[in-house]
Amino acid sequence: VDGTKAQPHPFDDAVTLERDNGQVRGRTTAPYNNMVGPFGGVTAAVIVRAIEQHPEVHGQPIALTVNYLGPIAEGGFELSARPVRTNRTNQHWTVELSQGGAVTTTATAVFGLRRPTWSATEAAPPTAPAPADVPVGGFPAAIAWAQNYEARFVDGGLDGLGGLPLDDSVTTMWIRDHPARALDFAALTAISDTFYPRVFRRLGSFVPAGTVSLTTYFHVSAEGLAKQGSEPLLATARAHRFGLGYFDQSAQLWGTGGTLLATSQQIVYFKA
Amino acid sequence: VDGTKAQPHPFDDAVTLERDNGQVRGRTTAPYNNMVGPFGGVTAAVIVRAIEQHPEVHGQPIALTVNYLGPIAEGGFELSARPVRTNRTNQHWTVELSQGGAVTTTATAVFGLRRPTWSATEAAPPTAPAPADVPVGGFPAAIAWAQNYEARFVDGGLDGLGGLPLDDSVTTMWIRDHPARALDFAALTAISDTFYPRVFRRLGSFVPAGTVSLTTYFHVSAEGLAKQGSEPLLATARAHRFGLGYFDQSAQLWGTGGTLLATSQQIVYFKA
């Protein structure tokens, strides 16, 4: 018995998978529960992790789309990750997550080799004070998964929702895993889904809302992520259009020194 | 023989599918050829059409992600479109397009019922003169598919590429099918992929580039599309980040009267 063995980070525990004869199994963990079922970001992270650990993986994450078909019940789930085509420099995946034979989540992913090319960042990060100058807090205590993040709201926090409709849906926050943890692709994927529904901000109230599909593009290599370490990301999101039962959300995740680590989109069901 | 029978529009011909005992077959058509294989936008449109014509379809397009695994050869292809889960108000699809048993294209789609809800457009359309005040033209004559569009470049046309690097990757254009054709979801999907690669603009030159994954969100119902008819769309696109062999593109497709019809993202492979 190694009495000095540390507990794993709750995030590492949540994305732990067992691989047995080609069968891959995971399970939900209480710290990443949402209102109904697990936090969608951790489900997306589990899918990234399943591909990363697949024996045929070729390269690093380039793009991921996750579709949320229905709630995941607390407990175990099965993952089927299939490399549909492996090209010289990239690889295309189709993934299904299921419980008791019923598919709860589908995904496609592009992985690829990263090589130096001409580069430029055309977008600009939002203006924000340094993390140390912004108070920690702002996620509701009732949301289990949110307790695993250290958030510092620069703009558009939930505290600002006073029942009055607001003109824009922008939220900007410093965010990292709590306890602090070196960033990897799975954790970056989860962070791309940490924004509360934009419609709350526009209406100034909580209404039924849930992500239907999430697409994240990765603009960084594993080497670049290592440079980020456990420093907070500057994360910003807004919507373009609300109507006919859905709205979109467009997000940017900025690393230290103005490095754009990821851009992300989602389409969200709402009732109002 | 009905001598008065009109030729179908080239777009309708390109997205025509045959359904036989659950097998769905299509074929490439010369007018929508790209440099290698068909225009990616028409492949995405074929996928939308395959779902729309499926006997179990439930609702209208909400979200579509298409992954381009490899080139499609001229000729026939098979489509497999599977409704993985049908909920009360939405439906999730997984689609594969293949030739000779090899998958060339994968996709997931969300379809859903549209109902009136609170609505707001937070994004603003780009400033542009009326279509009649912008000259038609600007797509290269050598690109077959581009001849099926009437484009009017407001900003960021290919003509402006003089070998000098430019500071931004924005292109804004009025665009519609040519000959003019009433807009439907398949055609709107194709138009979301009509921008030339953003890296051409930043580098001021043509370099190898190809879309790897395309995600389009639909913000309009069939009823709203009917109002648009065959009027030009104001389409605008830009990139956020270029590097490590890939760049992203973010696009907005605006209809008459400042109606945001669709938003779209893609991740593009490039060499430079």
Image (cartoon, coloured by chain):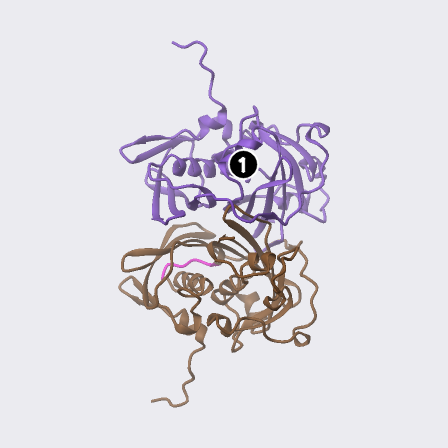
Chain colours: A brown, B purple
| B97 magenta-colored | no
Which segment did they paint magenta?
A55-60
Q: Residue at x 73, y 34 (%)?
A: B129
Q: Position of residue A268 (x, y in %)?
A: 50, 53
Residue of label 1: B224
Q: Secondary structure at mark 1?
A: helix
Query: Could you tell me which quadrant the N terminus of chain B lies in?
Result: top left
Residue type (three-letter) at the residue carrying disc 1 = Gly
Q: Height in image: B108 above or below B142?
A: below
Q: Residue at x 68, y 58 (%)?
A: A124
Left or right: where does residue B71 sit relative to residue A197? left
* Quarter holding residue B145: top right
Q: Main secondary structure of the magenta part?
A: loop
Q: Position of residue A101 (x, y in %)?
A: 27, 57
Q: Nearer the viewer, residue A253 or B61?
A: B61
* Quarter holding residue B14: top left
Is residue B36 visible to the viewer in this orientation of the structure?
no
Q: Nearer the viewer, residue B52 or B25?
A: B52
Looking at the image, the residue that sits furthest to the front is A163
Q: Height in image: B2 above or below B89?
A: above
Q: Position of residue A200 (x, y in %)?
A: 56, 59
